[in-house]
Image (spheres, rainbow, N blue to C red):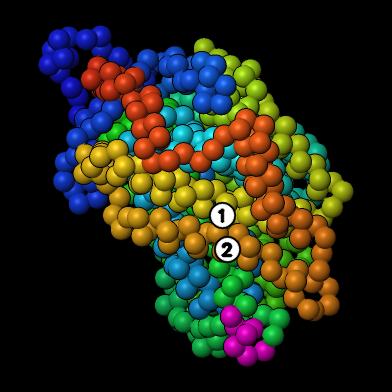
Amino acid sequence: MARDAAAHNQPPAYASDQEKGLSGAGSGSDGAKKDVLGGDGPVARVSLSSGSGVPSRDATHRKLKSRHIQLIGIGGTIGTALYVQIGKGLLKGGPGSLFIAFAFWCTFILAVTLCMAEMVTYLPISSPFIRFAGRYVDEAFGFAAGWNFFVFEAALVPFEVVACNLILHFWTDVIPTAAVIVIIIVLYALINVLAVQWYGETEFWAAVGKVLLAVGLIAFTFIVMVGGNPTGDRFGFRYWREPGAFAELYYDGALGKWLGFLQCLIQAAFTIAGPDYVSMAAGEAENPRVVMPRAYNAVFYRLTAFFVLGALCVGILVPYDDEVLTAAFKNAEPGAAASPYVVAMNRLRIGVLPHIVNAMVLTAAFSAGNSYVYCASRSLYGLALEGKAPKFMTKCTRAGVPVYCVGFVLCFALLAFLQLESNAAKVLDWFVSLVTASQLINFAVVCTTYLFWYKALRAQGISRDSLPYKAWLMPGAAWYGLVGTFVMAFVGGYTVFLPLPGQWSVPDFLFSYTMIPVFPILYFGWKIVHKTRILKPHEVDLLKDKAEIDEYERNYIPAPPKNMFEKILDKLFG
């Protein structure tokens, strides 16, 4: 992938671990080589604020390698939801509904991933899909999209802080909740104000632990279901037959089974993500035109395997009417005590593994929160670069960290103190409802932006075959993703409208649906104040920032691995 500097009249060589860098040629989804359309400019690139015309400098550094980006994408998605919260879906829908819902939702995630991959690989800049919404659709649309994504990511930080506290109480109740919250916030601050490569290394190894845990639990399921357990019970798919594959929720018969499936689908919509975390690292990725397509593919297929197989495993291990699992959620049992895996381990008389799982789940929760701090701060930084957030938020340290953005995000983490006044499990449910709606709106925004991008390419005579990455099934996949995510945004809190006693709840309603009206309020507010309009295809600026990327790509020379261990990691993660 290295380029010979002499081939370009010996331009200055930029070290990939010191400054922004790009290289080589990507490939389309069909494997054919595509013409690379860009590189990147110097470290302090000028990005004209679309809203005000005031120049802002992107002072972040490209120091994230392929392995960092792939594991950031995986690590940001795998948290307590895969190991613990997934049990709620099992109780409400049964193993069949859970498995089908998770597999079905992955098709929508694929559509969103394809949209992001094509656009971001073409122009790998900081906070890409947020800024694309303003560039390709409408400045007001970009403003609303950016702040929606920021709220989504920032709200996930206290969610994982609360989760970490619950996990620690699996072992002891002596540790004061307030102290746990403070310690976690301080650790997030220390990790995220260091140079980005240190964040990348921290998240890389934490994500490796998550992957090992996911693989280990899948292997555990297979071993114990065929009789490899202290009881010698070969239970196989027993619980799919008795009590059955599909649970009835709220009503008897087909309607109850449908509502159970719908609840599992809502659970999947909260649990499964990934492409947005890969995208947020584009502006700090080494050699992104080569690295990003590989990262999108690797993250999607690996996450799909983990989530779909995870949904299958919990349905094999525990019946949907399990009294222990039901009581664990009802009584807000701490940590992994509410995990279907731990419930199964205890039933099979396996004594040590629950503690190991709890320790790994703690690592997963902490790592996920760390990723959310990173993504939220970078989304706010992207908004500031575009003039849609206060200008002082563009301030970076010498190590390229947007320090004020990080500090502002950590203020959201203080919401974790809500659990001092309310049941911690209830607080988690509130955050789940809030972020699920925001995440679905964000996915709908990405698909909408892609459709405008697609029309602009055609109107301006740019062949998609010339792109570094050409997504397949377009524009049909974008429409599929848009319709699915848009509908699910309204379905998420449906239970409050059921004509049943005790279903209506003001907090549940507000956390489920607040972000839906907030988005148009932000959109029309910015539109009225700044008098923006929806761009026509021929008006879309597809060349902004491209010249700087082209220049840097020509000058890029990758830094060689520092040692044999780093060389092996680079080979493994491509």
Residue indicated by mark 2: 488
Q: Is residue 151 left or right of residue 383?
A: right
* Quadrant of res 43: top left
Kindly report the distance in space between the C-alpha atoms of the residues bearing marks 1 and 2.
7 Å
Which label was assigned to residue 455? Answer: none
Which residue appears at 45% of the width and 45% of the height?
449
Tell me the quarter of the image containing the N terminus. top left
Marker count (numbered): 2
Q: Secondary structure at mark 2?
A: helix
Task: Give yes or no for residue 253 being in the magenta stretch.
Answer: yes
Residue indicated by mark 1: 440
> Could you say where residue 310 lies in the image, as x and y percent from the top left?
48, 64
> Could you say where residue 566 lies in the image, as x and y percent from the top left?
31, 30
The region drawn magenta spans 252-258
> Could you say where residue 380 lies in the image, as x and y percent from the top left?
59, 31
Amino acid at the residue labelled 1 = Leu
Amino acid at the residue labelled 2 = Met
Which residue appears at 45% of the width and 51% of the height?
447
Q: Residues within 10 Å of mark 1 (few under 14, many from 20)?
A: many
Regarding residue 559, the answer to whether it shows in the image is no
Q: Is residue 408 above or below residue 470?
A: above
Q: Is residue 39 left or right of residue 136?
A: left
Q: Is residue 464 left or right of residue 454?
A: left
Tell me the quarter of the image containing the C terminus. top left
Q: Is residue 504 above or below residue 548?
A: below
Which residue appears at 34% of the width and 19% of the height?
548
Which residue appears at 64% of the width and 46% of the height?
519
- Label 2 near label 1: C-beta < 8 Å? yes
Q: Is residue 307 above or below residue 59?
A: below
